[in-house]
Structures are given as C-alpha cells and as structure tokens.
Image: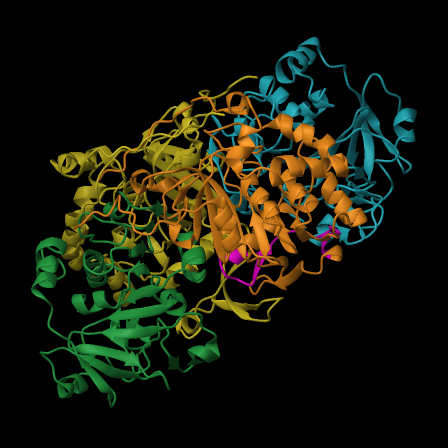
Chain colours: A orange, B yellow, C green, D cyan
Amino acid sequence: MKPAGSKVVTSKVVTMKDAVARLVRDGDVVVIEGFTHLICFAAAHEIIRQRRKDLTICRLTPDLVYDQLIAAGCARKLVFSWAGNPGVGSLHALRRAIEKGVPVPLEIEEYSHFGMVARFSAGAAKLPFWPLSDYRGSDLPAVNPLIRTVRCPYTDVELATVPALNPDVTIIHAQRADAEGNAQIWGLYGVQKEAAFAAKRVIMVVEEIVESAVVRADPNRTLIPGFIVDAVVCEPWGAHPSYAQGYYDRDNDFYVAWDEVSRDEARLRSWLDEFVHDVADRAAYMDKMPGLRERLKAKPRFCEGVNYGF
Amino acid sequence: MKPAGSKVVTSKVVTMKDAVARLVRDGDVVVIEGFTHLICFAAAHEIIRQRRKDLTICRLTPDLVYDQLIAAGCARKLVFSWAGNPGVGSLHALRRAIEKGVPVPLEIEEYSHFGMVARFSAGAAKLPFWPLSDYRGSDLPAVNPLIRTVRCPYTDVELATVPALNPDVTIIHAQRADAEGNAQIWGLYGVQKEAAFAAKRVIMVVEEIVESAVVRADPNRTLIPGFIVDAVVCEPWGAHPSYAQGYYDRDNDFYVAWDEVSRDEARLRSWLDEFVHDVADRAAYMDKMPGLRERLKAKPRFCEGVNYGF
Amino acid sequence: MAVRASKELHDGDVVFVGIGLPNLACNLARATHAPDLVLIYESGAVGAVPDRLPVSIGDPALVTDSLGVASMADIFQFYLQGGRIQVGFLGGAQVDRYGNINSTVIGPYDKPKVRLPGSGGACEIAIHAERVIVVAPLSARSFPAAVDFVTSPGHAGKYGTRKQLGLPGGGPQRIVTDVGVLEPSPDDGELELVGIYPSATVDEVRSKVGWPLRVRSDLEKYPPPTAEELRLLREVLDPTHLYI
Amino acid sequence: MAVRASKELHDGDVVFVGIGLPNLACNLARATHAPDLVLIYESGAVGAVPDRLPVSIGDPALVTDSLGVASMADIFQFYLQGGRIQVGFLGGAQVDRYGNINSTVIGPYDKPKVRLPGSGGACEIAIHAERVIVVAPLSARSFPAAVDFVTSPGHAGKYGTRKQLGLPGGGPQRIVTDVGVLEPSPDDGELELVGIYPSATVDEVRSKVGWPLRVRSDLEKYPPPTAEELRLLREVLDPTHLYI
C-alpha cells in the first residue's frame, strides 16, 4: 500500500496580510486564543492595520492583545472572563472604552473562565449549550442573562448552562504545522483546540512550517487537524510579547511597560502608529526591536522521542 | 527555588495480585478500558484468579477481555456499545451468558460508542448527565430507559442525555508511568483519561516504571496525573493479545484463534485453567508462549524530541 | 463492491472509515482518483496511511505516520457531532426500504434470534455524517421492507423523517451492493435502484429486495472493474485476501 | 502573610495556585513542611516546579519539568468540577462577613466606581475546591459587611447558604490577612478572628473589619516567621522582591 507521508497537494500557506484580508471581515465574531502562551499578536496587528471595524472579540483573558484592538477602535463588543494585565494591573484602553466610550463604545459580556471554556466546548461540539456545575451563589447570572439553567433528567438537580460560542474566525498560534495546517502545540494548550473547532474559519499561524513527515513522525502532538484550517501563515515571533515554548520566552518587561504606554491615550496612539500602522509586517516589527531575539530566545531543553513502531 | 524533578516520596508500586486484592471487590462496577490499544488482559486474568463475583463490567467494546471475565463467571452485568471479536465474529462466552445464562446469567445495558464516551465524560466531570445530539430515529432509547432527553434553554431543541458512569475502579494500561502513577500514553487514547477521572479508584498498569524525570522531560505526553492513581503495577506485555504502541504489536492470530477456543464451553474452561488459573502472574503466562516476544516485539520508529526551554 | 464504493469518494473528503471493505475502498480511492482523502477512524487515528491492511479499526499501523491522534471524546464530539465528517461508511445485517440499518438484533430485542454486535459508532455516524455510504451484499433476508431494530436511522421510519427529527447529516445516500447501487428517492426517501453491474439484471436485483423496488429511468450500467483496479486490490491492497 | 498561608497547606495536597502571594506560599511550603504538594495552575500546568518566580499563571517555567499539561477544559471539568482539588487560593478586592468575595466591580455593575478584572476561575474555585484559602490584607474598605458584587460565593448570602445551594466544596476556610487569620463560624459561617500575629492587637483587627467581629475564645497567637522562613522567602523564593 502506498504511504502518503510527505505529499503535500493543497498548500494553504499565505501571508498574514492575505489571510486577514480574506478571512476576517467587519462585524465578525473574532477569537484570538492562547492562554498566556501562543497569543497571536501578529494577527491582531494585521487586523488593526487593515482597520477592521465592529468586531465582537472573545477571549478568556483580553490581555494586551485585545487592549490594542480596542485602542485601535476595531471592537464594538468584548466577551471575556478575566480582564487585566497579568501581574501588572489594569488594561487601560479597555477601561477607557467601557467607561468613556473612547475611541468607540465597548459593550461587554462577562463569564468566568469555566464559562468561557464551556462556551467554546459547546461550539466545537455543535451543541447549543454546555452544562456546568457553577454560578450558584454568585451574582454573575444576575448580570448576564445568557447564563441559564437546565434540570438533570436523572437527579432533578439544576445545573448552570452557557450558550455555544461559534466564532466567525478563530486565529490560533502554534509552534509548527505542515502546509495543510496540521498543527502541533506543546506547553500550555489553553482552549485553542476548542476555539478552533468552534469556528467557521480558522487561521493557523506558526513559528515554523514543516514537512508533513515531521508532523506524521509524532502524531500525538497534533492538536488541530489541517482539514479544519483555512489558511496557514508562517510568522516567526508572531506571538511576541506572549511566548512560544521552545522558541522564545514571554517578554515580561513589555507587559510591565505596557501599563505606562496604555495609560495615556495619546501615547498609546503613537505606539500603535509606530509599531503597527507604520510597519508592514511582523518581520518589520521585529526589526524595530533590536536585541529582543537575543534576550528572549529559548534555551535548549529537548526531550527524548518515543517509539511509534509496532 | 528547589527543583523537585526526580524525587519520589510515596511509591504506589505493588504487584498485580496486591492491587486487585486491595482495590477490586465483589459487586464492584469495574472498567478495564483501552480501545483496541492497551487493553489490560493481565488485570482481567488476576480478577479471574481471585474469583471476583457479581461485577458490573463496562467497556465500549467488551472484546476478548470481557469474554474471558464472563466465561469465568465474574460478571453479572455488562454495559457496552459494540460486542464482537473485531474482524473475526462473535464473542461466544458473552452470547452463551446472555442467551443461556452460562456460567451465570448476564444482564446487559446497551449504548452506542458516543453514548459510552459521554457517560465516562460525565463521570469524569462530576456532572450527573451529558447531553449529546444522538439517538433520534433510533430504537436504542426504546430498549434503554437510561437514554433520556433534556431541552436546551436557548434553542428549545431537545437533546439526548446519558447518565454519568462512575466506576468503583478503573484499570488503565499505559506505556509508562513514574512510581506515583503519572502516566504517559501515545498511540490511540481511547477513553482512558475519561474512564480514569470518572473512577473512585484507579489502577495504573504499565509496561515500564520510569523515573519522574522521564515524565517531567515531556509533560505534554502525560495523560493521567498520579494524584488520582491508587496503585501502580509494572506488568510488561500485560496488554497481550492487545498491543502497546512502541512495545509490541497486536496479536491478530490470537484474536482469530479465540473464535474456536470460545465457541466450545469446555475448551474455553480448559483455556482459562491453563493460561489463567494455573499461572501465577503475567510473567508465567508469557513463559507459556514461547516465540511470542520475537513475533510481536515492536520495530523501532522513534520520533524526535521537542524543545521545552524558554 | 470495493471498486464501486471507492468511486463514491471525492478527493479531499474527510471520511470516517470502518474496517473491511470500506477500508479497502478508501485505500483504493486513495491509490487512484482521491489521493487527498483524509481517513479518520473512530479509534482516534486522523489522516491514517496504514502500510498494512488493518484487521481492526484500532490497528497500530493506523497511528504510525498518521497526521494526528484524537481522543474518542474529541472524535465523537468535535469531529462527528461537530459536523466535520463528509462521508461515513456503514455496514449492517439489515437495511430497509428507507435506509434504516440494523446491526443490533435479528428478532425481538429481549429474545433475539441473532444477537449482533450493536451500534458501536453507527448510530451517530448515520445521524451526523454529511453523507453515508452503506456497503452490503444484497439479499432478501438482508433487505427487508422494515428492519427488526433501527440501530442507525435512515430517511424515514416510525419516529418520522430525517427532517422531522432534525437530523443534521444527509443519511444513507448510496447503498453499494454486490449487484448494483441503491439511492434514496428525493421525494420520500425510499431506496431505488440507480445503477447496476454488468453481471446483474434488474429482475435479479428486485428478487433480492423485500419491497417493490423502483428503478430509476436513467439506470446506470457500471463498467466492470479495470484490470488496474483489480490488480491494486488483489496484489497491493489486500495481498493476503483478507477481505476479497 | 506568605508564611502564614504556607502553613495552611498539608503535604500531598493538590493545590490550585494563583499568582503572587499564593504562589510564594506554595513554594515556601514545598521548601519546608510539604515537599509533596501538587501545584496545579488553571493555565494547565500540573505538578509544576517552577525554577523562577512566575510572573503570570501561564509562565513557561510552570511547564518545563512539570508532571503534565492539561487543556483548560480538562482543568475545569475533570480537575476542579471533578472534585480533585483540595485547596484553592483566592484573593479579591472585597471579602465580606460570610466570606463572599468580589473581584468584579466596586459600585454598581453597570456604572462601576472601579472595574476589577472579573472572575477568571475564582467563581468555580470557590464552589468546587475542598477548602479555599483567601489571602488579602485587612482593611475596612476591603472587608465590608457585604460585598458590592459576589464573584465567588462564601458561606451564606442573598441566594442562601452553601448547603441550601448544594455547593460541593467547603468554601473559604481560612482568610489569611496581614494582621491575623479569620475562619468561618461552624454555626452560621460568619468570619471570626481565630489567630493573630505578634505585631497586631485585637482592637486593631476589629477596626479593619466592617462588621462586629467575633473573636474565638481560644485565639491563637502566631509566632513571628523564623529566620529560615524569611531567608527562604527573601533570598531564594523571591530574590528580586517581586511580591515581598
């Protein structure tokens, strides 16, 4: 029988510019996931550059990536579960948008982490809701009418529910994928798999595009199959200031420095001009950060392989 | 800060005899999972040797492993979704028990694969039920009153439900674990993780016990954390005639030969005497199968490691 | 049947494969007109390229060199229920007038004449796959007007039509047998003869079906398998004649 | 606070760790009386042994050399909701008389005086962990009689008691502050003073709490941190004084 290991017939590889132009539209429900790890800032910057509008942006932790999208006026609604700059403080652009409607008013829809995870799980499983034992005794359901209840047909116990979340487009960053988008991730998984399966369209951004044979050599590392992926973008350092295990460390200094940048609206606008609007792509962004690669490049800590023979 | 990588304080390593004696009790709901891959026949044989009775045994595919338990009279009820000898035919001991009550009557409770997967998922998540879009138009709910429905609080659509399955004990076979039971599996996962988390007690049987440092070198391979494991048993070839990817191949000849063995009740009894009752343990069982190791030992097909540095 | 079934597959299809003939058909399609089929097994192997004919759907050869491995929870929830599977293959001891399939019992459930293996993943494949291809040899016993037990729903039955039940998948779109191919009528979902092998006659087909079989006016006559197809099947794909 | 919180941990506990002081407390416990703590982070790191003080709960150092990595779906469903977590750590801007915690808003939800980060995993930790340890400096603003918004349920509130609500976990069992430790009354769940640091007085503690604080008759006087504990914290665990 014919082994088809290394054959690549349909390459989905495109530039970030083309991927965003084709797959992210004004008014879309957009998800850029990744819990601390593998947050695709490069995609957010391209969305800002292409001046998308009226997006509903969803993430457990809006983080700097959505603070920037909000500051640029791309979003009209935020769906989230924890909005802060981890270990640093507030997300100032987000707060300005909520509190003062600057640069545009921002509607919010709020869950807990478990609620958001459950929304993505329901979306991925094409179930209209997901049951969870949660929210009893909390004020969250009182301020979010989409948190409801269902009665168990066996125990008659009442459980909380959240509705499915099915983004128009989910953007995932991974360490590597082949040209068809079969993507491998190690380190923290977050809710990347659920967010990808829940989406109508998936953009897979990777540190490296590898031969299919590399993916096939270790199939248990594959988190997302290529057949649900619409575009593959090779964007080294595309997660900075987030990180990619085995590739580069989190830029904690950047997160700390962001507090001051974002506190002042004018300063944040000029940051966006300098590092987003006035650069063509991620490579140009990296050129503006001399010494960054040396400072954050991962040290080698390779594990052993395992035997897939039989 | 102190790296604790290789320290092992509480070893849970025991013999199969001790594990079964301590953790499997008459009348228990017992699960030995593994979908084709990593089915722990060694544990089933020890249960037979210790003459456990009145067990409710649950598995997606009863396979030869439960055919043997049933033939030995250990089970009073079977919960399942596909009962056959894959690619060969019927499970004859199982059919004799259902049709003629030989050696003891066997009650059955039947789902589809998805239903069984969902039952384990609910058990693992400590939810009383799991919703699934399934069973509409099928006669299965008509013969299993535990398949019920729930109404979605968002769409008013009716969905099927199955109740949680929480075994008294789940037995998992894995390629390797450390002495605390942190277990790594590659190749097919089946529903091993869900079945383990659903259980009150977990027996982890492995081909190799390794230093914690081996597990820690590649944490993304860990499927089941040690803190939910009660006993760790090192039992090389413990899955034969099932297989362990990277260790040994499936013994397809054995599966074919089983058809004749199990078709005849007396012959099956004498097989159980020879290969189960009259051997002390798995090592003695393997001694009775000269040439087996050479025939089935896995060829090397090692993958590369990945970088966990930062 | 394997050759005919292989032609039902389009290049790039994501296919939920069973063992035996469906597996052969998929690998024949992969070796001929559909090199980019994505083969998914309910055991969790995704993008499998087995280098031997797998005896079981959990064969280790399905994992080695595959594109990925998924837990069965993901396979059933995210792949199948998630609507990501284009083609599902099903067999069954009985197939009826409306494409309902029985793989559970012959006779009454509580006192079966023959106890069959049961659903496995068949019930949910029939509900969720975009289209289902059924592969089964035709005989009056196997194709009654109504099955004894509906394991996997077809186009209509005592619980209603697929539309009334809100089933997301397309159900059995092609029933590939050893004498010809049946397809549901677009009107009422009743299986009709749409194509026939050169070795068979319409009367022969009719005699092997438990209801008055309608024949499409544009009945197709299939060509015999080519020498190359037979060579591939016999020498490359199933050299030990496990299934053919 | 870090020293006191570390003493609340028993060896072998499976602990859901937050960042900052809870992380310090866990690592101090691990370096002293509880070497076999299993540290789990909501980010998915299981059995983490970070070789630097993590700034975020998703730090790469939590993965390297850990025992395993779980998806967040598994963390919340199988670990937390599954009842596998013994200890959860929570902070919060406000803690009230019954241990309800607010990390959502000060003031009304629709027109907040201060918008806080929100629940994250706090709501479900408060519901499911066997026991919750709250770490927060004491002040009248932070310990009102009733919180402005219940993010994470304590022992009683407008929706009922834990028992009435059927909450599986034990709720906030110890509230470790900078002047002493509070514990819920076994009778009605109201927080009471059970221990005090050598530098503090009962009157001082009472002045920093927004309800008439009951004091246990067997009030414990904690010894000051030992030189070794301080050395570990300052020189080994947080040498750059990120948190202390």
Residue found at the far top of this picture: D227
In the depicted structure, whether residue C29 falls above or below residue D181: below
Q: Quadrant of residue A151?
A: bottom right
- Asked if residue A132 lies in the magenta stretch, the reply is yes
Residue A46 can be seen, yes or no: yes
Compared across the picture, whether D240 is left or right of B3 comes to right
Give residue B261's position: percent from left, percent from top: 15, 54
Going 34% across and 56% down the picture, which residue do you hit?
C42
The quarter of the picture where residue A163 lies is: bottom right
Depth order, front residue of C43/B25? C43
Q: Is residue C93 magenta?
A: no
- How many marks overall? 0
* Left or right: residue C203 compared with residue A63: left
What range is drawn magenta here? A121-141
Residue C71's place in the image compared with B157, above or below, is above
Residue C111 shows in the view: no
The quarter of the displayed image where residue D210 is located: top right
Q: x and y percent of residue B66 in the render? A: 29, 52
**A186 relative position to B267: left or right:** right
| Image location of residue C87, percent across then percent down | 33, 64
Quadrant position of the N terminus of chain B in the picture: top right
Above/below status of C195 relative to B119: below
